[in-house]
Image: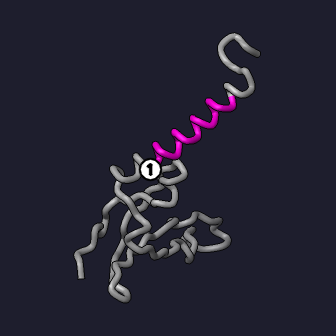
């Protein structure tokens, strides 16, 4: 089995967000193997402050969500940036085409 691409405490980026022009980060909280694949654990959220009348310690008992991802769902920053650029360039090209088709440009209203 190959070594994991990422390790605990690494900052990674979600591939699915990068391909639509966004940088969504996650911090690896844990990893294990399942059926020969590396599975990464991400904890989302944090303690929620609630009124004293609800909880004496002012923290929700359900303060984290655990999510699991396969290695292919993450990319590094250097992999994410070109994905974002390609998506955003496509959007710019569509805007430029709309400007041309509609006769918009400098000096038009």
Residue 48 in the figure: left or right of residue 23: right
**Is 86 colored magenta in this rendering?**
yes
* Residue matched to label 1: 83
Q: Position of residue 41 (x, y in %)?
A: 41, 74
Residue plotted at (44% across, 67% down): 73
Give above or below for 58 relative to 37: above
Q: Quadrant of the N terminus?
A: bottom left
What is the residue that sits farthest to the front in this orientation? 101
Q: How would you rate the neighbour count of disc 1 (Cα within 10 Å): few for under 14, some for 14-19, many for 20 or more?
A: many
Residue 40 in the figure: left or right of residue 106: left
Residue plotted at (41% across, 74% down): 70
**Is 106 colored magenta in this rendering?**
no
Local SS, label 1? helix
Q: Position of residue 21 (x, y in %)?
A: 52, 48
Residue 65 in the figure: left or right of residue 81: right
Asked whether 10 or 89 is in front, the reply is 89
Give above or below for 42 relative to 36: above
How many dots with numbers? 1
Magenta stretch bounds: 84-98
What is the residue that sits farthest to the bottom in this orientation? 35
Give above or below for 20 relative to 1: above
Residue plotted at (67% across, 18% down): 105
Asked whether 31 or 87 is in front, the reply is 87
Q: Main secondary structure of the magenta part?
A: helix
Which quarter of the picture shows residue 8? bottom left
Which quarter of the picture shows residue 57? bottom right
Residue plotted at (48% across, 75% down): 66
Give the color scheme: rainbow, by chain, secondary structure or one colour. Answer: one colour
Asked whether 56 or 79 is in front, the reply is 79
What is the residue that sits farthest to the top in this orientation? 107
Q: Quadrant of the C terminus?
A: top right
């Amino acid at each position: 089995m190959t070594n994991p691409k990422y390790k605990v405490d690494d900052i990674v980026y979600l591939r699915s967000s990068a391909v639509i022009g966004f940088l969504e980060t996650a911090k690896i909280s844990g990893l294990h193997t399942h059926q020969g694949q590396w599975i990464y654990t991400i904890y989302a959220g944090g303690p929620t402050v609630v009124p004293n009348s609800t909880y004496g310690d002012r923290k929700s008992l359900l303060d984290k969500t655990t999510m699991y991802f396969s290695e292919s769902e993450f990319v590094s920053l250097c992999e994410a940036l070109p994905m974002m650029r390609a998506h955003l360039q496509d959007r710019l090209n569509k805007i430029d085409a709309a400007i041309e088709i509609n006769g918009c440009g400098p000096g038009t209203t």
